[in-house]
Each structure stands twice: as C-alpha cells, then as structure tokens.
Image (spheres, coloured by chain):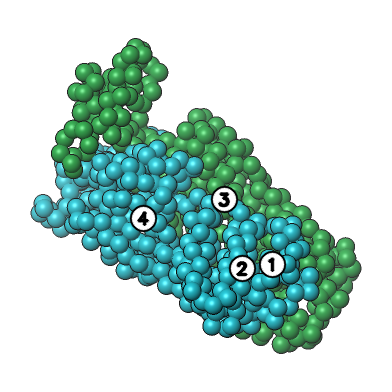
Chain colours: A cyan, B green
C-alpha cells in the first residue's frame, strides 16, 4: 500500500492529489464522460494514480450522481431451478454485462408484492427482471417504477400489470406432451402435479395445456396425479395403479418421471407397453434411463436477444408494456412412449 | 400516485414536506437511528408520509452516509451448483437477512483475481463470501479490504492469503469413499475425474483423498479415470474396462456414477459383483438406481452458525484470518458397493 494508513480507503481526492488534477477531472476520466474533453496525458496520469493507490470507484456514488445505476436486478427465484434455467440465466447475465450493465441477483426471502419491491427498489436498479409476476403484482411494479427503474420485466409463466412480459407459457409444455401421446394412440392420460410448494406456477399451466390438447378427442381423459418427490409418495400413487386405468403419464419433468417410472417398474407395470411415460427438460438422465425416457425439450431464447431488448427499453422507457413469447417446446421421442 | 408528476421519483425532501418535519428527521426515523430521540407521533407522521408517497430509501445514499453498506456480496460460482449447495446458499442468505444484511449475488463472469475484486468492490460490500479462493488470490483480497470490506471470507476447498476461510476440504469426500471401499475388501480403485472445466477444484482434492486413504494398503492401487458427462465418453471409458482391472470406482458424484453405471451395465459388467460403484451428494437418484447407489453424504454447516460468524467478524474486524473446517462426509451404504 503506497500511501496512507493501512486501513484508510483511498478516495478520488487521493487520486486527484497524486495525479495533480481536480477531483472533477478524476471523475470525468474514470467514468469515461464523453461530454468533457481531457487530454490523453492527463487521462494516463489519472489512471496511473488510481492504479497505484488501489482506488476503485464507488458504484453507489456514481449512481447517485447519475440519478440511476447500471444495475439490472434479477431477484432469485424462490424455488430451485434446473440446469436449463441456470444456463439461461448465466447466458443472460453475460449478455447484459456486454451492454455494460451490472447484473445483481437478490433473494427476496419470502417477501412478496410491494414489500419485496420496496426491498429491491432500495438498490435503485435501472431494470428489474422478476421471476414471479404473481408475487410481484401491479403494486410491486408501481413501486419499482417510482424508485426510478426504467424497465420492469417479468420472466415466467405469468404477467403483472404495468410490466413488460417475457412470457414462458408453460401450457405449451403440457400441450406438446399430450399431442405426442395422443398421436401414439394413448387416450387416458395422467398428469403428475408435484406437491412441493412453489411449483404450482409451472405445474398448473402444464396441466391446463394437456387438458386443452385432449379436449374434444374421442375417449380422451385427463387424470390429475398429485405426487411428492419421495419414494413413499410414488409407492402410494402406484399402489392403486391398475384402478386408475391410465395408458399414459406426463410426469411434469424428468426427475418426477424417473421417480414414477422406477415405482411402476418395481410393481411390474411395463413402460411403455402398459403405461407410456413422458418427462420434460430433456436432461441427461432421460437418455440414461431404461427404457430411454421421452421428454419435452424446452427452448429458451438467446441471452443476447433478451439483453438487447432490455437495453432498448432502458434507453427508450415509457412505452406500452410489451409481451414476448419466449418459450418453445417439442418432444424428443425415445423408448418410454 | 398522490403527488408529483407520474415519472418523478419521490425523495426524502418530499416526505419531509408532507410530514412537516426536517429532512434530517426523516432520515433519523426511516433509518431507525437510536442516537436521536424522536417522539412517537412524529415517527408515525413520517412513516405515513413515506407510505403515501411511495418513498423508498436509497441504499446507495445510506451506504455513502454510513461509509459502508449492510451488503454481503456472494459472488456466484462459475460452475453450476447442485441442489445441496443451492439449499445451503439459500439458508445462509436467509440467516444473514435475519442479521439485517442484504445479500447480493453477483456474477464475476470470467473475471478473476484483482479484476473481479475491483468489480465487486464498486458495490462497497461490508462483507464478501467468495466461492473460489484461487481465482480471488491475495491481491483480490487486498483490493476488497482497501475498498472497505470488513470481512472477506472464502468458501470452498481452498484458501486465499488474508481472507478468513470457510474450508470445505473435498479430500474428506474422497477419503470417505475410499475407506468404505477398502473396508468392503476392494483394492484396485478407479477415481472418475470429470473433464468439464471448473470442476478440478473439487475433483483434484477428492482424488487426493482417495490416494491418501489407499496409501500403504497392501495391493492398494488408484487409477485416474477422465470422463466427460456424455454417453460417448462413458462408452469410450468402458470399452477397455476389463483391461483396467478395477474392482471399484469412486465416480466423483451421483450424476457421473449414474452415467458410468449405465455404461457398465450396457456392457455386461455386474455392479457391484465385478465393480463396486460409489457416488457422492446422496441425491434422490442414488436411491432410484438399480442397484441402489452407495453415495458419500456431504454435510454442510447451518446457515445460522455461519451468519453469526460473519456478523462477529464485521463487528470486530482486524483479527487474524480464521480457518473453519465446515465440511463433513460419510458414506450411505446401499447396494452398489
């Protein structure tokens, strides 16, 4: 540490002193302000002084000066997300950083609506990508906008009034599975509905998608199958399997499909001969199961495209809420159906 | 919106005006300053005015006033974490919020060392919990401390000079698996080393742990098995299986164990008769495989205990770096070994 006491935090005043310039000049140089002309030697002197002192600009001070930050807040979902969404979030985060945004994830920890929005608003993000539109609500959107957020997006299966929607219509996942099963001659379709809290936001529209596809098909029938992610629950469900009279199951996702398939096989139910099974997410485990698991592959948009959209709305705020359908779904047919 | 133009952001001055008090009083009330006595009716008036206007305090302004924030920064790991670590991170986040910290996750996006630390330092966190000590390094720790961070912790298998360490010694995972296999009479132990980048930080110490346990055991032998998480790679590895002469495998984790077990079974290698297999993480899938998979269960400390530790170091900074061993490992014995 070249100057000062070991515990003093270097300030822009220290940088100004060492470089022999004003604090304003330090600020112009380090914030890359284009409105003010500063000679190349002066720029170099400021950067050298900042480096020598170990000076780091203060994002908070910068955001106070600018009136807003370059922070994009992505509240972390309350439920664990699978590898597909992890990869999507990482790509989006990377793409936003290419547009010079700082992406910050922030857990709402059980807060909902206005309360959560107020906690997020304290960070003064310029944009928010919220994973749960229902929890946020119109009032939460209003709180964020009043705090200066120029772009509020929801990212998921539902919409919130006043926010732009990156709509992930989960009904398409159920519809794809059901259309595949119907095309393979199956008619009495069970649909796994996980009992774990927080998953309804995905499982309900998936069930609705199956119902919509089966509606009007002769002899078509849909049966809801509540299932917790435990062996006990799977054993309980399959105890009365023949009484259910199902010839196919859409198992919510690949994890539940593996749980259910194992319980069926342990009871001597042949998959797919007696009951066809389709999962979703197209995980590696779908390929490793025997029979190999048919699965709905979910397609998400490129992070780059979404980052461009966010940046456009930040630069031109005030437009009407936009709705973008961003989810695609298609069945990868293997041996279980 | 009761007052102002639709796009104006309410300020503490607006709150002061509506409540008929000074800005200082608004600040004292909303920040719960205990040093200044303010009457209950005044407090109520300020809170009512803030609510009516939709005023949200600015975390950045507050941290500038205080000289530091209540922000704990947890840089997100570069690699996808499993459900075990997700649950641990969520619990820790929740526990820290009980101590009135705001937990923010922030992707370093490929930056390492000083560069990453500078990006994090811009947010002026009061504490940092960094998942990758090697990438951060002593210089990164110094950058964070100079920016005012009172507590810098690393959280993972390695240490960084100057930082407190929540040490997750992955050698214990390998050692537990190897001791279990040795006790079952196995001697020629293969160890899966994933080829996916970023996992070396876990896979190398796990391998070292196996080597340490086998060292000195008569006829004991350890063979490194590079494996990518693809069916092709598993097929390639098991093509020459009998030539390897292994009677056991520690498969890095349950996912790789499932991949390898399936490839072995497809080639007629009997598990556990010909080759015993042990995974790690004790996921649900371990119980669902046939034979049921033996797996190393990893125990992580309670979020509450860690949050207390972080809070103590923030309140009493300046002590020598502390090292806390926070990982436990024990084998859950099932049918595959």
Distance, label 2 to label 4, CA atoms, is 28 Å
* Lower position in the chain sequence, tag 3 or tag 4: 4
- Identify which residue is drawn at 50% across, 30% down: B315
The circle on residue A159 is: 4
Answer above or below: position of A14 versus B15: below
Classify mark 3: residues with Cα within 10 Å, few (<14), some (14-19) or many (20+). few
Residue B68 in picture, x, y percent from top left: 38, 35
The residue that label 1 is drawn on is A244
Q: Which residue is nearer to you in this view: B200 or B331?
A: B331
Element at label 2 = strand
Tag nearer the camera, 1 or 4: 1
Ranked by sequence position, the earlier of labels 2 and 3 is 2
Q: Which mark is residue A197?
A: 3
Mark 2 vs mark 1: which is more N-terminal? 2
- For the question of whether residue B122 can be seen, the reply is yes
Label 2 to label 3: alpha-carbon separation: 20 Å
Per the image, the residue denoted by label 2 is A190
CA–CA distance in space, label 1 to label 3: 25 Å
> In the drawing, does residue B148 fall left or right of residue B221?
left
In the image, which is nearer the foreground, mark 2 or mark 3? Answer: 2
Q: Work out whether mark 2 precedes mark 4 in sequence or the reverse, and give the earlier one.
A: 4
Q: Is residue A319 left or right of residue A232?
A: left
Badge 4 local density, few (<14 within 10 Å), some, or many (20+)?
A: many
Chain of the residue on which disc 4 is drawn = A
Mark 3 touches mark 4? (CB < 8 Å): no
CB under 8 Å between discs 1 and 4 = no
Q: Quadrant of residue A59?
A: top left
How many other residues sit within 10 Å of disc 2, few (<14), some (14-19) or many (≥20)?
many
Chain letter for the residue marked with disc 2 in the picture: A
Identify the chain of the residue marked 3, using the numbered disc in the image: A
Q: Are marks 2 and 1 in contact (CB under 8 Å)?
A: yes
**Disc 2 to disc 1, C-alpha distance:** 9 Å
């Amino acid at each position: 540490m070249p100057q000062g006491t070991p515990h003093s935090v270097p300030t822009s005043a220290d940088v100004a002193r060492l470089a022999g310039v004003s604090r304003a000049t330090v600020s112009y140089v380090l914030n890359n302000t284009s409105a003010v002309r500063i000679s190349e030697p002066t720029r170099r002197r400021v950067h050298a002084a900042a480096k020598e002192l170990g000076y780091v600009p203060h994002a908070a001070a910068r955001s106070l000066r600018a009136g807003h930050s370059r922070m994009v807040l992505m509240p972390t979902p309350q439920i664990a997300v699978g590898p597909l969404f992890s990869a999507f979030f990482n790509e989006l985060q990377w793409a936003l950083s290419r547009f010079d945004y700082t992406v910050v994830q922030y857990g709402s920890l059980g807060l909902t609506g206005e309360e959560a929005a107020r906690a997020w608003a304290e960070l003064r993000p310029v944009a928010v990508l919220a994973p749960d539109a229902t929890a946020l609500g119109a009032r939460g959107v209003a709180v964020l906008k009043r705090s200066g957020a120029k772009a509020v997006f929801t990212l998921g299966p539902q919409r919130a009034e006043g926010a732009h929607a990156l709509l992930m219509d989960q009904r398409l996942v159920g519809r794809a599975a059901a259309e595949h099963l119907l095309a393979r001659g199956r008619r009495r379709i069970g649909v796994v509905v996980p009992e774990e809290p927080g998953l309804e936001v995905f499982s309900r529209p998936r069930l609705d998608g199956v119902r919509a596809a089966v509606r009007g098909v002769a002899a078509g029938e849909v049966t809801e199958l509540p299932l917790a992610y435990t062996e006990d629950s799977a054993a309980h469900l399959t105890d009365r399997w023949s009484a259910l009279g199902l010839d196919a199951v859409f198992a919510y996702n690949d994890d539940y499909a593996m749980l259910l398939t194992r319980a069926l096989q342990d009871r001597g139910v042949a998959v797919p001969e007696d009951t066809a099974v389709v999962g979703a997410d197209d995980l590696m485990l779908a390929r490793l199961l025997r029979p190999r698991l048919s699965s709905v592959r979910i397609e998400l948009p490129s992070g780059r495209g979404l980052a461009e959209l966010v940046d456009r709305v930040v630069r031109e705020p005030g437009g009407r809420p936009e709705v973008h359908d961003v989810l695609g779904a298609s069945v990868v047919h293997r041996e279980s159906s």
